[in-house]
Image (cartoon, helix red, strand yellow):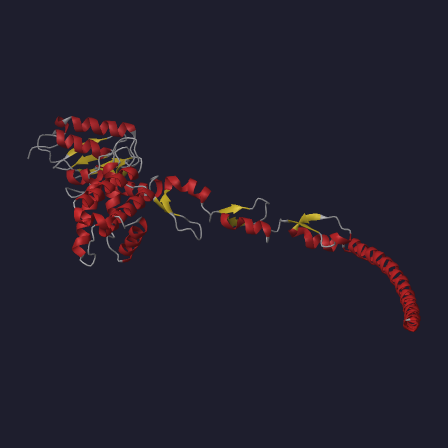
Amino acid sequence: MASQIGSSNFLQNTTDLISLLPTQTTEDLSHFRGFIQNESKVGSTGNLGQLTDSKGNLTQFGSKGNLTQFGSKGNLTQFGSNNQLGSKNSLRRQTAPLVCGNVDVIVQNAIAAVMMKTVADLVIKLKINTAIRQNLETLREEVELTVLQIRHTQGKDILDEVEAALNNLVQQKRRSFVALISSIATNNDIDVQKQAKLLEESTFWPTRFNAAREAIVKIDFEGRDHCTQILVGHQILADHQKKECPFRTIYCPNIGCTNVYSARMAEEHQKLCEFTPVECPLKCSLKIPRNELEDHLNSICEMKTVKCPFEHIGCPETLPKVLLEQHLNEFSHSHLIFCMRTITEQEKIIAKQHKEITELTTAFTEMKNEHKTMAQKLNELEKVVHKESGKHERDFFNLH
């Protein structure tokens, strides 16, 4: 059997394989490449090639050109026969370039929503019977095909292009149903939204998100809304997609938030998310969701500034709420003095008011007595007047 060591295919295969071997010294790898390029050192039969590296380790090659053993620093590394790493097909699978393909989930969801809305719009405007599943499937296929046929213009927003293309589809369908034009005028966005919600609740078109993803990958040749990074090895690809890719999907970790976004938007989302825990501006020990911060500051914050409850009797202290109890304990003697002073002042005021009330009561009694006396005098005067009036009347009649 002729040796395959000298063939160009095997040489390329083996050279690629070197990069996958465990760490070797530069001298070892250089020696190894030199051996591969010199077919005469192995022999024409190719049954077994041996080479001693710079460290004195034995390197062996199988009869079919597959790497069986490679020694380094006294360690033996084995790669098996044709169906192991040494085989040409296996090597190609290990080194085949793989594209990440992660997409911006916000753009993906937006496109999926527009696609569903378009189907709902067509259902209403074309009077489609949704009870017949085939009708919906036909619309779905047309919408997907329209999106996938979009030719992206550099610099334009993909979502805008999708909306424009699907609007054109709706207009074309409307023109093809001239007889229904009179009824089209009564449709509005509210009807479309209701129909889209009904379609979602009926679990129609669960694959629309996959269709949106496929459309982004196909249209977005600029890589604005999906990852175009090329990697070698499935494990490397998986690690990149889960840990490093800026387009990997992130579920907001904040309790109460249901938003989903790409990793590249994580920082911006956290700055705006109303559920993001933020430090209290008054520097208390709590982190509060942004949407509860105002209530926190106005009520339970332990660093909220409060006035001493004895303020109205003379204590001027203003302090953080957390220190109020300590203040009350430390200044209880001062507060007691404030209380006693206030009580004394109140007693003086009460005594003064009592004196004034007594004086007013006396004056009222005197006025009451005067009023009684004046009433009696008035009554007597009325009697005199009445008597004199009667006398004058009699004198008048006697004269006449």
Between 33 and 360, the one lying in front of the other is: 360
Position above or below: 349 against 284 = below
Q: Is residue 37 left or right of residue 221?
A: left
Q: Is residue 164 left or right of residue 257?
A: left
Position above or below: 271 against 311 = above
What's the residue at 43%, 40% (across, down)? 268
Q: Position of residue 61 (x, y in %)?
A: 17, 35
What's the residue at 24%, 27% (across, down)? 30
Q: Position of residue 233 (x, y in %)?
A: 25, 40
What's the residue at 21%, 56% (across, down)? 130
The quadrant in which residue 346 appears is bottom right
Q: Position of residue 300 (x, y in %)?
A: 59, 53
Quadrant where the C terminus is found in the figure: bottom right
- Can residue 376 be seen by looking at this rendering? no
Between 328 and 367, the one lying in front of the other is: 367
Q: Position of residue 88 (x, y in %)?
A: 15, 38
Looking at the image, the residue that sits furthest to the front is: 400
The quadrant in which residue 265 appears is top left
- Can residue 364 be seen by looking at this rendering? yes
Give the total of numbered labels.
Answer: 0
Position above or below: 203 against 178 = below
Q: Is residue 16 left or right of residue 113?
A: left
